[in-house]
Image (cartoon, rainbow, N blue to C red):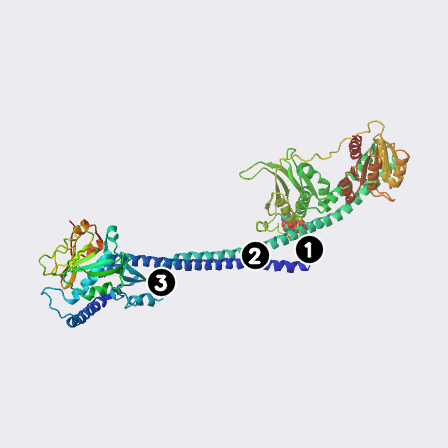
Amino acid sequence: MDDLNPSPRGRRARRRRWAALSCLAAAAIVVPAPVPANSPTTLERAIQANFLFKFAPFVEWPPAAFSGTERNFVICVVGEDPFGTLLNEVVRGQKMVGRPVVVRRAGGEAGPTGCHILFAGHSTDPGYAPFATTEGQPVLTVADKSAGPSGAMIEFVRQSGRVRFQIDDGAARANGLKISSKLLGLAIAVNRK
Amino acid sequence: MKQATPSRLSLGKVVGQMATPLSAVLIAFLLLAAGLAAAIQLEQLGRVEKLRQTTVQAQVLANGIAAPLAFEDDVALQEYLNALKADPQIVAVAAYDGKGAFAAGFARPPARLPKRAEEASRDAPPAALAVTVPVKQGGTRLGSVYLQSTMDSLSRRLTRYLGIAVIVIAAAVLIVMLAASYSSLRRAHQALQAEIASRQQAEEALRQSQKMEAMGQLTGGVAHDFNNLLMVASGGLDLMERTQDAARLEKLRAGIRQALDRGAKLTRQLLAFSRRTPLNPEVVDLRERIRGMDALLERSLGESIGVTMHLPADLWPVEVDASELEVAILNIALNARDAMQKGGTIVIEGANRPVHGDLPDRVQIAVTDSGAGIAPELVNKIFEPFYTTKAVGQGTGLGLSQVYGFARASGGEVLVDSIVGRGTTITLLLPRSLLAPRESDRPAEPVGASGRQRILLVEDDDTVADTVGGMLTTLGYEMERVDNGDAALRRLERADDFSLILSDMIMPGEVGGMELALRIRKHWPHLGTMLMTGYSAAAASAAKEGVPLLAKPFTIQDLSVHLMAALDHSKA
Ligand SMILES: Nc1ncnc2c1ncn2[C@@H]1O[C@H](COP(=O)(O)OP(=O)(O)OP(=O)(O)O)[C@@H](O)[C@H]1O
Ligand SMILES: [Mg+2]
């Protein structure tokens, strides 16, 4: 069967490598800030930003999550923001459940009020507990397992050089979120309890 | 008019003959066209259905690959796409991400994959079964799926239609063949019908000419015979004038009587013989009929041939044309005579033949001679028309063909049994009739008049008038004679004191017998009328008007019986 489509996979792989190189070059110029040893590469961050937005269609929020005054679909980023403008690029012009998608950087103290997705970045703050405030709230919490706080519903992990994620479906359900089985199927690990 | 008929007929025939094959070819073509149209229609429906199927497949795929596409899980994505490789009709599949960039896919040559999603929807050839459906999740467009499939291969589709095609073509061929055979059959039928018609004509002509031939044969003999009869009668009268011996007078009178009887019978036979009628079956008592032919046979066969008849009284009746029967017997007898050059006896035997196997009750009439016989190889030929072994002018070869035709037309058959040098038996087998034969007028005793009855005799010929008048007086009627119809009317106007008017049919003067009868019926309805004639055409017209008729010549017995009947009738 492979002989029937010899090219796509290889071509795609080559293309991605090329894209990665160019992104790396761009990152080296644009973001020269030092990063933790195990912190994600720029490419990985771009992918994570992309994923972060794309989790939304696979998750069902309870109606209560949209009952407030907020007219937007809000993605909050707390702690250190690893994405910079990447995330804004991703969500520009996008809509989720009929609402424009916006990114709000709360800087850790504003709390998760009105957030639909909460990404918690790395923080050196010893009292940093970003997910404590969302306990029991219909907020999808996301973090990078290797460079962020633990306890998020979805955690980015690195697997053979690729960005993947694991899901705590139990926690999501406890907070009134329904995660599509399609997404669960793609996760490398799912905690269903 | 007569000339126009054949050409119109043949034109009609041609049109008629062409109509069937033409319409059959037309029907066959229509059938083929309908088959083709059905196939095209089916093909189109199949295409629409296929497109729908492809769309559904693409939608299923789009739904499945939403997550792998969104999260760039190439392995899972490729797995989803590869699952479609199992379907040989899917020639190209591709998934594009939200920005329209190619994500994964495969294509079987010669199909190729569009580089970008936009190309996919744009470049697809109109005939190709290609669809592009969006990959959506929770209302967000995550990318698109491109799916291209083919119809079944041409050969597969053709095989699918092959069955129908074979049936349709076979049906078309069948129709054309049937039509062809039908029209050839009809041609044959027409030819046959024409043949039958011409044969019937020939047969009719044959029968007629046969009759004429027999007539001719008879005429000579009859003339001669009449001379003999006249000889006996006139000689007898001469002798009667010269003797007073009562016994001798009685003998002479008996001789004259016998001669006249034979003459009357002979002319009656001749009249029946010459009547040109188609088969006119009646229930016939064979014994009586054949016995009644004795004078005719005697006359026709000549002095050296004797005739013996064995006809039992209980012979079953048959339903045949009586005059044809007589001609047939005469023909067989004439052949027998010809076969017995030195003279001899012809035996006519009748017998009942009861049911045998699937043969019904039949009556057999066998005519046996002791003549030359017929060679076995010729037995089959003798019934053929114009087959004769006789010298030119002696035989026409129509005799036995008349016999055969008569037997067949009567539902019977003819058998030949012959030994060369010993003789021949020709047997007529005729089916039994369950009806009783009509009571024939057997010679009855003359019945005298009852009471005083006056009869007006209208007759122009003095001799006949004297004879008939004498008969009437002898029977005890009072009689008055007038010369013609006009005189009769004048006499009746004076006084209608008669019981019956007995009139000749053909008379000089303005009022003929028929006219007279009609006028009497009108003006003196209580008077009976009876006509006499020796002329058969006149007799027919009298029968048509329902006027009682007495055929000349008649005996005093005939006269008495008819008078009784007519008087009875006029009284009622
Ligand atoms: N009783 C018979 N004995 C011997 N031969 C016979 C006898 N009847 C008929 N035939 C043969 O059959 C032939 C055909 O007979 P058919 O009566 O048809 O014709 P025909 O007697 O020759 O002529 P036609 O009867 O027309 O004058 C005769 O010519 C004769 O040879
Ligand atoms: Mg003959």
Type of amino acid at the residue the image marks with label 3:
Leu
Q: What kind of element bears circle 1?
A: loop
Report how far apart the C-alphas of labels 3 and 1 lie in the structure: 85 Å
Relative to B281, is B140 on the left or the right?
A: left
Classify residue B258 by image quadrant.
top right
Q: Residue at x 56, y 55 (%)?
A: B186
Instruction: Write down the chain letter for disc 3.
Output: B
Q: What kind of element bears circle 2?
A: helix
The residue pinned by badge 3 equals B154
Instruction: Write down the chain letter for disc 1.
Output: B
Relative to B564, is B43 on the left or the right?
A: left
Q: Quadrant of the N terminus of chain B?
A: bottom right
Type of amino acid at the residue the image marks with label 2:
Arg
Report how far apart the C-alphas of labels 2 and 3 lie in the structure: 47 Å
Tell me: is circle 2 under 8 Å from ligand 1: no
* Image marks 1 and 2: residues in contact by CB distance under 8 Å: no
